[in-house]
Amino acid sequence: MEVHRCRFVDYVPSAINALAFAPNTTRPVMACGRANGDIEVWNPKNEWTLEKVIPGGKNTSVEALAWAHQTILTEDDDFWDSEKEKQAAIKKLVKTSPRLFSAGLNAVVTEWDLTTLKPKRSVDSHGGAVWCMATNHANTVLAVGCEDGCVRLFDIADGELAFIRSFDKQKTRILSLAWSLDDTTMVTGSANSNIYKWNVEFGRVVSRMTVDRISGEDTLVWSVKILSNGNVVSGDSLGHVKFWDGATTTMLQSFNSHGADVLCLAVGRDGNTVFSSGVDRKCNQYRFVDQPAPKKAGKNGKVGKTGSIHGKTEMVSKWVLAGSRRFHSHDVRALALDESRNVDALVSGGVDVSMVVCPAAQFPDINQRRLPYVPQRPIVSISKSNRLMLCRQAHGIKVWRLGKSASPVQPYSEIEIGAHMDLIEPQQAILEMTFKEDRNLTASALSEDGHWIAVADIEEVKLFRVSENPARPGQLIVKKQKSFPGVRGTGAHFLSFTPDSTRLVVASTDSHVVIVDIAQWESGNFDTLRKFGHHRGAGGKESESMDVDGQEDIVGGEGQAETIVYMAVSADGQWLATGDLKNRIFVFNLDTLQHHATLPVFDAPLTALQFHPYSPTLVIPTATNVFYLFNVETRRLTDWSREYSSDKNFPTKFLGLKDKIQGIAFNPARKNTLLVWGATYICQVDLDQGVGDRNAILNVGKRKRVDRAKDEIRKQQRERRMKKYAALGILPMPELESGKAVVVLEGKKGRKVLAAATNHVEEEKEEEFNFQLLHKFQPLMFVDFVGDNSLVVVELPFIKILSSLPPSYYRASYGT
């Protein structure tokens, strides 16, 4: 098979600035804020699934994130006519989805609509750049620390976002803040070596704690937290982690455990565990433990026995450095901790763009998991017939023409795996477009004929016609279609052209599926042929739940709009499938422009949608790495899927892959074989076979190494057997290798020898396998075929990202 290994794509992920888990009163979910303004929402279920990406924009770096989930009523008891009515109101509050707030250096505090992924409301901080932000424990007040040295409070109760008041102004910026458990006091870390304790009611400083200074320079207190017992922990720019008595504001203990700035802290729910990290990349764990009291000196100055009471050793509680690990190559800017049983995760992120997850309860004795830094949703699209590839960036797109290799002199099956093939035509960047809008792009598409490019952000959809300059062959002319109306002023989460390049399908930000005719572009007509509102709960029948694995059903939940995250058009242009975050999948007939089918809701989140190019079959991968084949004409699963699509049937090695299936590809030369791929693997599945042995070795390279080892063992056994026969005077004969009985004459007596039985060697049964894994290409951004046995693989090596990052912290040790 010919593989176009593309590493020239200009895409660099953005650094992680903030991490935040939602309150434990709602479902587990975590937000990740990046330096380009994007906010990713992750679900820890099913080995961490990315649900959505809220697009950012220029100069909108996310410096702070906060979730709010109000569960208490703000009205007085007299407001309610009965206790039953009051309890119903509380129950309604608990069922409400959590709210997400962000802030950064643009001096704006924003609440996000988690369905449309647009700003729901925004307010000015009134104090410049926002460096820190936190909600009180009642989730009714939001506090922000500003550049002008002032803490400001905003009312977020009952869906509001309104300014309340400011605290007394300090002469330095506020870098960190934390609420006490009873929400009556607050501590803030500043850029002038001080930690201030505030009375929230009056907005005044109650007391002050001062950290160490060097050469009279101010120390930056990058992070502060309040423990459950009221004590305070801080991390500063000298690399110190300090514990303070919350009542007397005196320092209890200090750890010089970091070589540089401590940028972030995370505190356990019980207040007995603290994590710290920062510029030196170390992640340290501190535990509050009981230790024997120190030995006391007697009157003569000699040290006596350890203090004891009634013969028992006296114990004192102290903080100790319990463990340390290095997960990152550059500064760690954010930590998030969730100790609940169904999550149990410590998450870290920073300049090296990757999120690292490790079990908090077993830190530091267990290996970490690095979540993929490549996009989980497609940013690459191709034109197979023209061998063109488009890649979307934050504020533009770039199009390449793929290269061509010389025709091999021997069949691909006889060429050594990984052999390099010379190019007769190298790849060429033929088009680059940069857009002036400050908003990051959310979707893009390239038509199959290569003449159309569509891009979108959260506000609008743009359409461009691409043609070759007749006066200068090889030069392209790009013309924006100004008469293209878009979708009534809304943006899009997904775009796709039909295979004949005559229609554009738009999954809008308001959860509509819009079919636009672009065939009459020369006359300036772009008619909207149909607009489906099924993902808004309008026009669709209630989905039935599918319990494909015999587990508990998950109901789709109709009547509510949800973000459309996946879309696929069949190769013949007849069928359109769309899926949203409620796991609802709708199939539409593009010939009749009618809704055709509503699929049952699967028991795990979707990770992709793709039609089989030669049959009306929709391939549906899920977050458990089980994929299903659904025949849209018969409206039922295929025979293969009904028999094998289950976590009780799929190979255990395949189900154990941490990275989710991100896409499906079909080889035109093998029409009933598909490739499923994730960030670190490609897996080939033959649909003409079963799944094979569940415990078979799937890794192609490993299986070959095992086969070579087995062959070597058999060779050694044969050599030993031949030596034994030679010692007995038996001549080697071909029949000995086949295990047949051979009669050997020695003098007047004949002796019957059974070669295979002599050493009791039984040939091992060949294991049956279907799923064949390949880990040669990674991390993967895109995989698809452009022709028979011609595969395009787009990789984003980490070394390429490292080359674009600043130098990491390094302190020379003695002798180095």
Image: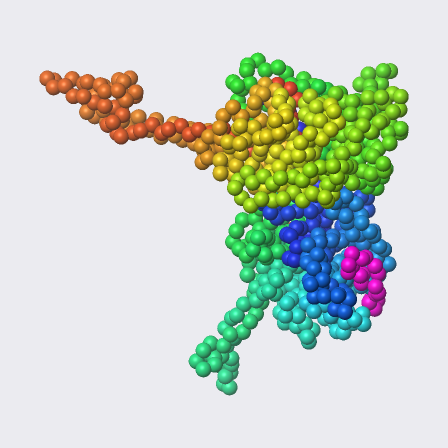
Q: Is residue 704 left or right of residue 507?
A: left
For the view shown, which residue lies furthest in the bottom direction? 299
Quadrant in the rendering for residue 230? bottom right
Highlighted magenta segment, given as a residue range: 153-171
Quadrant in the rendering for residue 52? top right
Residue drawn where x is 69% and y is 52% of the image: 19
Q: Against 161, is 712 above or below?
A: above
Residue 724 visible in the shown view: yes
Q: Is residue 161 magenta?
A: yes
Q: For the N terminus, which image quadrant?
A: top right
Between residue 575 and residue 207, name the one nearer to us: 575
Q: Is residue 745 magenta?
A: no
Between residue 74 and residue 344, name the one nearer to us: 74
Q: Residue 548 in the image: x percent, y percent?
A: 55, 38
Q: Against 784, is 24 above or below?
A: below
Residue drawn where x is 45% and y is 82% of the image: 310
Residue drawn where x is 74% and y is 52% of the image: 100
Q: Residue 579 in the image: x percent, y percent?
A: 68, 36
Q: Residue 688 in the image: x percent, y percent?
A: 52, 23
